[in-house]
Amino acid sequence: MQQRRNSNVQGIDVSRYQGKIDWLQVKADKREFVFIKATEGQTYTDPNFTANVKGALSAGLLVGTYHFLRGTSAEVAKAEAAHYAKSLEEIGGAKSLQLPPVMDYENNPSGISKAQINIVAKAFLTELERLTGVKPIIYTGNSFATYFDTGLSGYDLWIARYSNSRVPDDQPAWKNWTIWQFSDAGKVPGITGNVDLNEFNGSLSDLKARYGKEKDMNNPFDGYRLTSPFGMRTHPVSGEKKFHRGVDLVVTPADGPIYAFVAGEVLHAKMGITGSGFGNYGIVVAIKDDKGYLHVYAHLSAAGVKVGQQVKRGQLIGKQGSTGISSGAHLHYEVRKACTPQFGYTATEAGVVEPTQYLINYYGQTPVKEDKPVTTRDINVPSKWAEAAWAEVTANGYYDGTRPGALITREESAIVTNRLRKNFLALIAGTNGDVKELDLRLKKIESES
C-alpha cells in the first residue's frame, strides 16, 4: 500500500483508557479528526463516549465513532449494530457527526472460518447502514485484513500497522488505505499517557469532501417543528403578553443537532448573561452573516463552535437544549439587524427581522416545505387590495397602529371579528329592540349552525 505523506491530515482515536481529555489542547496540536469508541458487543457502551463526543465537537475536531465487534453469527452482528445505532441516536445520530461510523473487527477468538468472518462483517455493515443511513468504514489490523474478501472492497479501509518504515500490505479487498493507524504509543498534549495516532490519505479539505456531513440547506427548517412563531404571544413561562423576537423550533431527540442556517463568523459561543444581549437565552451561538445580520441560536445544551471561527451553511454548531429561561428543549432562532452594541439587542420588533422571511430573501427561495408554492412578495409593500381594504378599515374607526399588509395573530383577528359582531348587533338593535336579546338570539343561531 501507499506511503504516508507530510501533507496528510493527522488525527487520533480514543476510548475510556485516555481518561479526561483537554480537547482544546488536542486541537491546538493540529489533530483535526478523532474516532471515539462508542460501544462493544451487544450491551457495552464506553463510559466516556458522550463526554468525548461533546468535547471534541466543541473544540472543532471532525468526529467519528467506532464499535468493537465480537459477534460470530449474522444474527448477533445485527444485534450489535442495533446497539451501536441506538447509542448514536442518543447523541443526535450518525448523520449529526462529520465522519462515518466504524466497524472495528480485528480478531477471531472463537476461531470461526474465513467465510463466516465475512458473513458477520457484511451483516453488521448492512444493518448499521440501514439503521443510520450512513455507509460505515472498516477498521482492522494488517494481518486480520487478509480474511476479508473482495465483497468488502467497497468500504473504506482504516488499517492498523505500527511501523515507521513498513507500509500496510496489499490485501485481497484493498490496495490502498484511507486511514492508517500508524502508532499506538503517540503523545498528544491534553491526553495523559499513550494514544493511537492516525493519518488520513489526503488533506483536511479532502477529508471534509470525502465524508462531508454538512446538512442540505435547500430547506433549512426541514426536520424542525415550529412551536412558536415570530410576533406577539403569551410567554410560555411567565404568562405575559410579550413580543417574540424569533421563532421556536424543535428537533428530535431533545439534544439533537443544530446546524447553521447561514455561513458567517462566530461572535458568541457560550452561556448568555444579563447585560450581554443574551440574558436568559442560556447557551447561545451567534453568527454574523455577510450582510451584517446576527443569527442567534439560543437555549442550546452545548456549543460546537468557538468565537472567531468561520462556519459554513449547514455546519453543525451545537446541540438543542433547554438552558436559560425555557419551557422545554427547543431552539430559539432569531435574526438581529445589528451585531453591536450588546449584539444588537432590543426588546421590540425594531431590532429584529422575521427569520423565515429573511432566509427566503437571503437565498431567493423558500426554506420551508409547503403543500403549495410560496410567493416571496415583500409583506412590507402592501398590495392594491390591501391598500383599499386599509382605507376602508381606518375610515370606519378600526385603526390600531398595525401597518398595511402586516401579519396579525389569531387573537387580533378574533378581536376585530368580535368588534364587528357587536357593532352589527348595535346597528340592528337601533330599530329592532334590545342588544342583549339580539345577542342571545344570535348565539342560539350560531350554536345550531
Image (cartoon, rainbow, N blue to C red):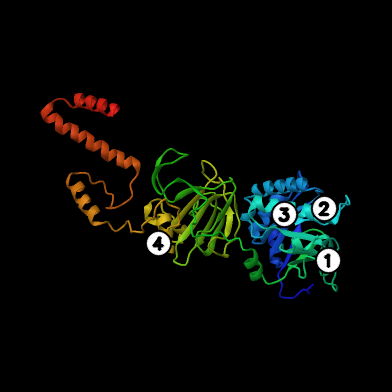
Lateral position of residue 335 relative to residue 204, left or right: left
Q: Which of marks 4 and 3 precedes in the sequence?
A: 3
Lateral position of residue 96 relative to residue 427, left or right: right
> Which element type, helix, strand or loop, lies under badge 4?
helix
Crowd rating for badge 2 (residues with CA inside 10 Å; few <14, some 14–19, many 20+) = some
> Which element type, helix, strand or loop, lies under badge 3?
helix
Task: Tell me, for residue 125, which label it has, or none.
Answer: 3
The CA distance from mark 3 to mark 4 is 43 Å
Amino acid at circle 2: Gln
Task: Tell me, for residue 161, which label it has, or none.
Answer: 1
The CA distance from mark 2 to mark 4 is 57 Å
Q: Nearer the viewer, residue 111 or 8?
A: 111
Question: In the image, is residue 199 above or below residue 448?
Answer: below
- Where residue 5 sits in the image (x, y, percent)? 75, 75
State if disc 4 and disc 1 touch (CB < 8 Å): no
Q: Nearer the viewer, mark 3 or mark 4?
A: 3
Q: Which residue is mark 2?
A: 116
> Which element type, helix, strand or loop, lies under badge 1?
loop
Q: Nearer the viewer, mark 2 or mark 4?
A: 2
**Residue 15: which quarter of the image?**
bottom right
Q: Nearer the viewer, mark 2 or mark 3?
A: 2
Q: Which residue is mark 4?
A: 361
The CA distance from mark 2 to mark 1 is 24 Å
Q: Which of marks 1 and 2 precedes in the sequence?
A: 2
